[in-house]
Image (cartoon, rainbow, N blue to C red):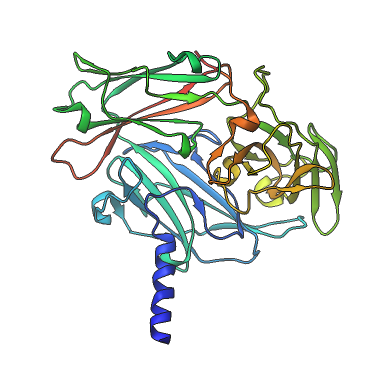
Amino acid sequence: MRKITLLLLLFISINTFAQTPYINNVFNPAIKSVEFYNTSKVGSFPVINLNTADQLLITFDDLRGSYRNYYYTIEHCDNKWNSSNLSAGFYMQSYQDDRIIDYQYSTNTMRKYTHYELKFPNDNIKPKISGNYVLKVYEDGDQNKMVFTRRFYVLGSRVSVAADVVTPNLVQLRQTGQKVNVQVNYGGLVVQNPNSDMRVVVTQNERGETTQTNIAPTYVRNGQLIYNDISINNFAGRNEFRRFDTRTLKLNSQRIARIYRDTAYSIVLLTEPVRNSPDYLFEFDNDGRFFILNQDGNDARRDGDYTYVYFSLAPGNLPPQGAVHIIGKFNDYRIDGRSKMEFDTSVGRYIGKQLLKQGVYDYEYTWVDNAGKADDVPIEGSHFETENEYQVLIYYRPPSARWDELVGYRLLSTAKK
């Protein structure tokens, strides 16, 4: 009986981290402030061009404070983020895994932590083919001790992509939605069946739950695939993200009611209203991103402090059955126990707390009904005028291929037309 129990526990442990499809996920709550972007621009989309000098930067903190023996590897995935089931030697040069050796201990902070950084591709880990990849970081060279996973993209440009954001054709969406039309010029690619050889994937603000996949083009003409059907690529415009700034802990910035210091810093934000009115109000945001910054020190990587941030939301006209969660890129838009707010009957407010490093943070509130369906529109509203970014990705897989190539990419911003 004991042997069966041990085998069952081992099976559960292994399969906890063998997630398919892969998502951005942090498995260890001691890991905070995971940033992942192209080194050309802080906070940028994690895409690099194949066989170029492009690099990605991954940074994170371990709140346990001491040095840990972290390793990393990469795995090739299909356009739906399932493993491509290719041998590592087929899609990866040099070694199959490597250690993260760049780290610093925090200095002059109330909360001690160890900061880790890694740049790749490098001489030890380098992708050989284009497509979707997942980065895996784990302890002691053991993938059963997975710490976190991150999606990234390797582009082998073989098509040109034109795209724009327009008013939806559907009347009921014209005031609240945005539509993305896409044109792919595939040139010398052999496309025998556009419905099976090509995939067009559109995502809003890097949010995986917004992803739409186009299989059948609306028109095919002279080496072009047109995706502009009335029913595809319609997105809720949503609202501008809410925002707070903790670059300094010496004074209150916008939306901060109070800062106090005890065993750790605590920041109390002003109580906020539900914003689901039909009127649009522009506010500057970073499309859901966060940036680690510290005006009180010299290097935010190691002297930025961690603070408990207290959120407060007035319920407005929300229904009594359901829950409110705080989401943003800082927590991968994850809806779980760590993002959930509690309703405090004594003050008639939803109250939530997050442990966050000093910086600038975008966030929003989302409503989750009793069936588990999440929707931010009941709290945040939705407007055609909202400024959003869209990532357009083109995948190519002819009948004889074993994997999905990423052959085109286009970044759209409704603020730049």
Residue that protrudes farthest toward the front in the picture: 320
Query: Is 261 placed left or right of 243 in the picture?
Result: right
Residue depicted at 40% across the width and 75% down the height: 8
**Above-or-below relation of 292 to 118:** above
Q: Decide if residue 60 is on the left or right side of residue 228.
A: right
* Residue 241 in sight here: no
Identity of the residue drawn at 75% across and 40% down: 246
| Residue 163, quarter of picture | top left
Q: Decide: is 320 above or below 415.
A: below
Marks counted in the figure total 0
Give 197 or 379, whichever is nearer the viewer: 379
Tell me which residue sits at (33%, 21%) in the image: 161
Give the x, y percent position of residue 417.
Answer: 49, 13
Quarter of the picture containing the N terminus is bottom left
User: Picture coordinates of residue 403 (x, y %)?
Assistant: 23, 43
Task: Give the x, y percent position of residue 292.
Answer: 65, 42
Q: Quadrant of residue 215?
A: top left
Q: In the picture, residue 129 is in which quadrant?
A: top left
- Can the viewer see residue 202? yes
On screen, residue 212 versus residue 378, left or right, reads left
In the rendered image, residue 194, in percent from the top left (x then y), is placed at 20, 27
Q: Nearer the viewer, residue 114 or 236?
A: 236
Question: Height in image: 386 above or below 195?
Answer: above
The residue lying toward the viewer, choosing from 269 and 73, is 269
Left or right side of 202 for 347: right
